[in-house]
Image (cartoon, grey):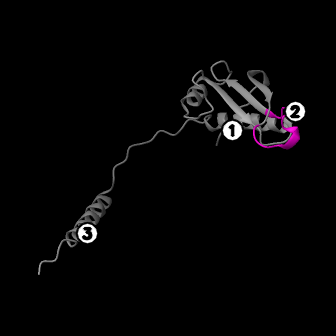
């Protein structure tokens, strides 16, 4: 069960920018897209969550440790802002719970025997592919 972490509004900045793509006459006048910037190191997140967040291989996380999320799917600035905040919350929630450590196990004797039998069958099939001597 993932714990929900609330991010205070003062820890991220939201900047209105112009959206990309086709949009008709209005697209060049109105700034409806949103850039959300969140500095992981300066945030109030727990240290273990910060470490897991920075360890993610996500293109939205820069080398300086800042997350930049761009939202431009909606037509209104408010809905784009809400979408960006929701994406940030989802990203943080995803790493909130630490991954379960992997316990090393061994294959059973029956599994080893099945594997060896399959290898032998396969080898026999391949041996029969040779040239037929007349």
* Residues marked 1 and 3 touching at CB (< 8 Å): no
Quadrant in which residue 39 is drawn: top right
Return the mark for residue 29.
Answer: 2
Residue sitting at the far front: 25
Which residue is at the front of the view, 103 or 95?
95
Q: Which residues are magenta?
A: 20-33
Secondary structure of residue under mark 1: helix
Return the mark for residue 28.
Answer: none
Depicted 91 relative to depicted 128: above or below: above
Secondary structure of residue under mark 3: helix
**In this view, the mark in front (2 or 3):** 2
Residue 119 in percent (x, y) is at 26, 63
Give the residue at mark 1: 90
**In this view, the mark in front (2 or 1):** 2
Task: State which tag comes first along the sequence, 2 or 1.
Answer: 2
* Residues marked 2 and 3 touching at CB (< 8 Å): no
For the N terminus, the quadrant is: top right
Q: Residue at x 76, y 34 (%)?
A: 85
CA gap, disc 2 and disc 3: 70 Å
Q: Residue at x 25, y 71 (%)?
A: 125
- Crowdedness near tag 3: few (<14), some (14–19) or many (≥20) residues, C-alpha within 10 Å: few
Give the residue at mark 3: 121
Quadrant in which residue 131 is drawn: bottom left
Residue 73 in percent (x, y) is at 77, 42
């Amino acid at each position: 069960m993932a714990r929900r972490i609330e991010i205070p509004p003062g820890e991220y900045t939201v900047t209105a920018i112009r959206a990309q793509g086709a949009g008709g006459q209005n697209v060049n006048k109105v700034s409806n897209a949103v850039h959300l910037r969140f500095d992981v190191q300066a945030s109030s997140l727990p240290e273990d969550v910060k470490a897991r967040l920075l360890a993610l291989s996500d293109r939205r996380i820069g080398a300086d440790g800042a997350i930049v999320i761009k939202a431009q799917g909606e037509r209104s600035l408010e809905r784009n802002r809400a979408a960006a905040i929701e994406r940030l919350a989802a990203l943080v929630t995803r790493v909130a719970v630490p991954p379960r450590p992997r316990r090393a196990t061994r294959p059973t004797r029956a599994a080893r025997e099945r594997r060896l039998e399959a290898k032998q069958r396969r080898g026999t099939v391949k041996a029969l592919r040779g040239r037929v001597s007349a």
